[in-house]
Every structure is written in C-alpha cells, then in structure tokens.
Image (spheres, rainbow, N blue to C red):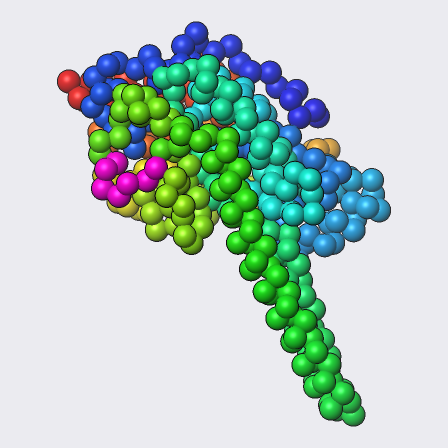
Amino acid sequence: MGDNSHSAPQEEPDQADWMGNLDDQIRENIPLNKLAIPGSHDSGTFDLNVCGGIAADFDPPYRQLLNMLSCLCCCLPSCFIKQWGKSQTLDFTQQLEAGVRYFDLRVEYDPSRDDPFHLVHALRGASVRDCMQQVKAFLDKHTEEVVLLDFNHFYSMVADLSKEVDRSKDADRSKDADRNKEVDRSKGADRSKDADCGKEADRSKEADQQGHEDLSALLKAEFSDMLCPYVPGELGGLTLNKLCTDGTRVVIFLNVKDTPKEFWPSSDGPIDSCHGWAQNTEYTVCPEAGWNAWKTWQAEKGKPHRSADKFFVCDGVLTPGTKKICCFSACTLCCCGYAGTLKTTCADAINPRLFDWMEDDVKTSNRGVIYIADFVTEEYGKTSFVRSVIKLNEELKVASN
C-alpha cells in the first residue's frame, strides 16, 4: 500500500482558488472565522515512515515494546500501525490544490537529526520544513488564498527521555523499598538518581524551549511578512479582502506558553474545538451508533461553545484508542482475513454522513466554522468532504443578502 497510491480526485476548475472566487460580498464582509473552511485532520500523515521507529506521540506504555518488535520483525508492527495512523493520502501541495485551507499539525522535535522537525501520528511523517515550503509555493502562485496552520501538539524526544527516566526511578524505588537489608545503600542510590533525574528534567525543559524557538524561527524565515499577527479583538474585521490587501495570508496557531507576536495562541486563545471522537467507541460494533454519539456530542458540547470572536474547529472524525485498534483488528483478522484500517473502519463510516449534517449546521448557525475530517479528498458518491465544505459558503451568501 504505497503512500500516494490514491491520486487526487477530479476537482472542479476553481477548487485551488475557491477563496478568490467567492462572491465579493463574502470576501468583503464576512470574517474569516465565519467562513466554512475545509481542513484535514492529522494533515501530515500522508507519508508515514515505517522504518523510522515509533513516534513520541504514541502511547508511552506501548512505544518501547513496539520499537523492539519492529526491530525483531522487520518493521511489521510499524506497517500495521501505519494503516491506523495514516489519515490523509495527499501531500500539502495536493491538499491545497484540492481546496484544503486548514492544517492540523503534530510536531516531533528531535535535535539529534539534521532536520529536527517532523509531523507525526504514531509514526514519523514528512519534514515540517518541506511542508511549509509547499504552502509558501502554493500561496505565491494563488494570490487570493489564505491558509491556517495549527501547530497544536509538540513532542520533544528529549522531554520524552526525561519521562522514561522518571518511570525508571519510580520502579527502582519500589524495588528498594522491599530490600530492608540495603536501606542505607538504597537511599544513597535514590539521592543519586534524584540528582540525575533533576538534570534530565532541566535538559528536557531547555530542549522544549529551544525546540519552540527553533520552530518559530523556521516559520518566520519561511513566511516572513506573509504572517498575520494576532491582535486581540480585531477578528471581526479580518476578512479575505483585508488579508489579501495587507498581504498577510498565513495564520499560524502555536500551542506554546508565550506565543510570539507573529503567531496566534491556541491554548485559551482565539480558537476552540470540539473533539466529538472522544465519546465514540461504539463504531467497532456499529458505525451508526458511533455516528449518533458523535452528533449528540456536537449538539451538547460543540455548538453551545462557539464564540463570535473565535475560530471554531469541528472535528468530524472517529478515532479509536490503542486497545480498541488491537482488539478490533484481531477480531477482523480472524473472522474476515484482514486487519482493517482507519479509512475502512472509521472514515468511510462517518464522512458520507457529514455532508448533510454540515449543511444543516450552517443553515441553523448562520455561519461557517473550520470542518476537518480524515481522508478529506476521497470521493463519496459524486462529491468529497472538501468540495462539500466549500459549497457551504453559498449558504452564507444567501444569509447575508
């Protein structure tokens, strides 16, 4: 199963320039956060590396075991994980040309590598630098388009090492407590381990700080004056026409404590999200049950929290936990002869159901939000998720007249 075995579907001619082709009234009067914007969930998973080890975002109890098994079994566990970690089939250029304008990004920082920043989802994916260069090249060619980049998870390999040391320390302390004859010696060893762990913790904090600074520098260097700075209270006037006139067509959200002025804070900042998947576990037995749970979650937790002065991300995905992946795959492998994938088990179950729901959502809310999903360019019937979201902006035109 190659990373790019799926070619881009035949899009409508204006798909790559859909923002520029919106009605002038929409471009002039409707703020960016009230447009219906198509986004991709785990955007950087189109090229996961099965030979690069398990990424730092994977559940810690399983990561070390799977890394060991991958070494013993010629990467077979990683190949299995890839089928559940891969959420998109197209690279950033192809996604942008298909109409995607919001990118959901998880970044792993490993300073030991020549290229230290990679997008991850259980496995390591594409280089952040390469992906940002694709975005910049697209924007240079399509001058009326705006892109939102949401760096909402940051994983440091050095910080992860510190956690491993902490777990090792706790295990050693438990063993030492049972060794009554060696109490004095174990206390001395614990003090030494505490000192070592303190050094590791300091090193991980320094690495996190350095990683955030290096990532910020990379983004500033790539986009420079194209970055749209965050100014509290001015989102209502941030329309497509204004962004294009100012030349600030890149909005970057950074989930860091002290966000540089060129970027937008994503923690307690101007962007909210509703992750309905957290309540959806029934899909393994019945996709319809998972879909109903998702709709209930959105109605109770999603719409009530949408603010007029914030972006809102509606997360249209069903995401299983590690245990459920293993159990479900084992059952389907025994009964059906295949282990299943994220696409066949989850995305294909929810994506077609999203189309009517999103249309009703825009009509009842009189506004759009950022809608994201897995495999956003896959065709279902005669349309795709991306094309369906773009079409929702026609409802905004009717509402604004």
Asked if residue 287 lies left or right of residue 25, the reply is right
Q: Is residue 172 above or below residue 145?
A: below
Asked if residue 270 lies left or right of residue 195, the reply is left
Hey, which residue is sitting farthest top in the picture?
Answer: 13
Residue 204, image x, y percentages: 60, 59
Whether the magenta-drawn stretch holds residue 399 is answered as no
Residue positioned 73% across, 91% down in the render: 184
* Residues shaded magenta: 229-235
Residue positioned 33% across, 47% down in the render: 269
Asked if residue 130 lies left or right of residue 36, the reply is right
Quarter of the image where one finds residue 208: bottom right
Whether the magenta-drawn stretch holds residue 234 is answered as yes
Instruction: Give whichever of 247, 42 is nearer the camera.
Output: 247
Instruction: Kindly tell me whether residue 110 is visible in this rendering.
Output: yes
Residue positioned 62% across, 34% down in the render: 127
Instruction: Kindly tell me whether residue 84 is visible in this rendering.
Output: no
Instruction: Give whichever of 193, 120 is nearer the camera.
Output: 193
Rendered-image quadrant of the N terminus? top right
Instruction: Give whichever of 330, 367 is nearer the camera.
Output: 367
